[in-house]
Every structure is written in structure tokens, then in C-alpha cells.
């Protein structure tokens, strides 16, 4: 089991989800069960799937949940576009949120690549910088089956 709270991808997705919860408070009441709900659920789903993947025992299972998180990010991207096109979300709010979603979408894709290709990799934690891989000069702490890897209101 891996500590999902330390994963950089989870932290970025969580920050985005919190930002979107605040942003959707300003949406019309008649969208409460429409776009507001869909945006909130897809944003939370990104974080939840990364967290669940961290709790799995194999790299393949972790990658499967990262794929689901990537799908939720794409869904979120569309819902934000729809809100902007309907005039519910103004351009000043949409542009930074869309940029954040795009950034978050790249992270699970990189995570999946690392999980599926390099058995020696360690996924990037918030305190680590760089490509997301551990420094190979340092001994790997774990040789386990699983190596983890805009506010507008």
C-alpha cells in the first residue's frame, strides 16, 4: 500500500477539485443536479481513483485506476468547456481551470507509462523534483511489487 497523499499527481488533482467546488458554488441553482454535480464528481473521481490505485498490490492494478482517473479528467475537461460555452463559467475562470485540467491530465498518463514500462521506477512524490523517477544512484527503498509513483470564485 502506498501513501497517496504524498503523490504529486494526487496533490495537484486534489487542489483542482477543491478549486472547482468553490467555483461551482456560483453556478445557477437549476444546474445543481446537472453541470455542478458532474463537475464536482468528475474532479473528485480523479483523486479517488489515484488513491484507490495506491492501495492496490500490483502495478497493473494501479495503472488501471490511473487510466480511470485519466478518463475522469477528460470528462471534467468537457464539462468545463460546456459550462463556458453556456456562459455559466466566464472566460477569466475557464482558461486557468482548463489549463489546470490539462496539466492534471498529463500526470496520470506519465504515471501509467512508468508503471507499465519501468519495473525499477519510483513515482514522483511532492518533495521530489524531476521526471518522476527516483535517482538511480540511491538504493531503492522498496523492491515490492508496487513502486508508487486556479482558483476562480
Image (cartoon, rainbow, N blue to C red):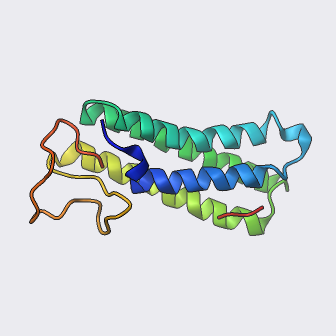
- Please state the horizontal and vertical placement of residue 88, each as a whole percent of the image: 84, 53
Which quarter shows the C terminus?
A: bottom right
Residue that appears at 50% across and 37% down: 48
Relative side of 135 to 57, left or right: left
Q: Is residue 8 above or below residue 32?
A: below
Which quarter shows the N terminus?
A: top left
Residue that appears at 79% across and 36% down: 34
Determine if residue 67 is in view: no
Relative side of 17 to 137, left or right: right
Quarter of the image for residue 9 reads bottom left
Residue that appears at 57% across and 56% down: 15
- Please state the horizontal and vertical placement of residue 130, each as a whole percent of the image: 30, 69
Of 139 and 50, which appears nearest the observer?
A: 139
Determine if residue 13 is in view: yes
- Please state the horizontal and vertical placement of residue 65, each as a whole percent of the image: 40, 35
Relative side of 85 to 73, left or right: right
Residue that appears at 59% across and 64% down: 99
Q: Is residue 86 above or below residue 99?
A: above
Relative side of 82 to 67, left or right: right
Picture mark count: 0
- Please state the horizontal and vertical placement of residue 78, each as a whole percent of the image: 65, 47
Q: Is residue 89 above or below residue 71?
A: below
Q: Is residue 143 above or below residue 56?
A: below
Amino acid at each position: 500500500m502506498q501513501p497517496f497523499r504524498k503523490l504529486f499527481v494526487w496533490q495537484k488533482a486534489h487542489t483542482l477539485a477543491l478549486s472547482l467546488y468553490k467555483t461551482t458554488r456560483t453556478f445557477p441553482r437549476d444546474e445543481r443536479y446537472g453541470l455542478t454535480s458532474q463537475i464536482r464528481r468528475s474532479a473528485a473521481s480523479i483523486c479517488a481513483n489515484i488513491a484507490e490505485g495506491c492501495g492496490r498490490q500490483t502495478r497493473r492494478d494501479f495503472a488501471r485506476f490511473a487510466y480511470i482517473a485519466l478518463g475522469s479528467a477528460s470528462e471534467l475537461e468537457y464539462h468545463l468547456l460546456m459550462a463556458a460555452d453556456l456562459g455559466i463559467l466566464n472566460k477569466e475562470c475557464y482558461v486557468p481551470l482548463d489549463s489546470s485540467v490539462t496539466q492534471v491530465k498529463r500526470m496520470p498518463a506519465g504515471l501509467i507509462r512508468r508503471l507499465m514500462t519501468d519495473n525499477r521506477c519510483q513515482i514522483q512524490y511532492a518533495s521530489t523534483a524531476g521526471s518522476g523517477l527516483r535517482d538511480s544512484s540511491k538504493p531503492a527503498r522498496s523492491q515490492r511489487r508496487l513502486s508508487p509513483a486556479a482558483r476562480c470564485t
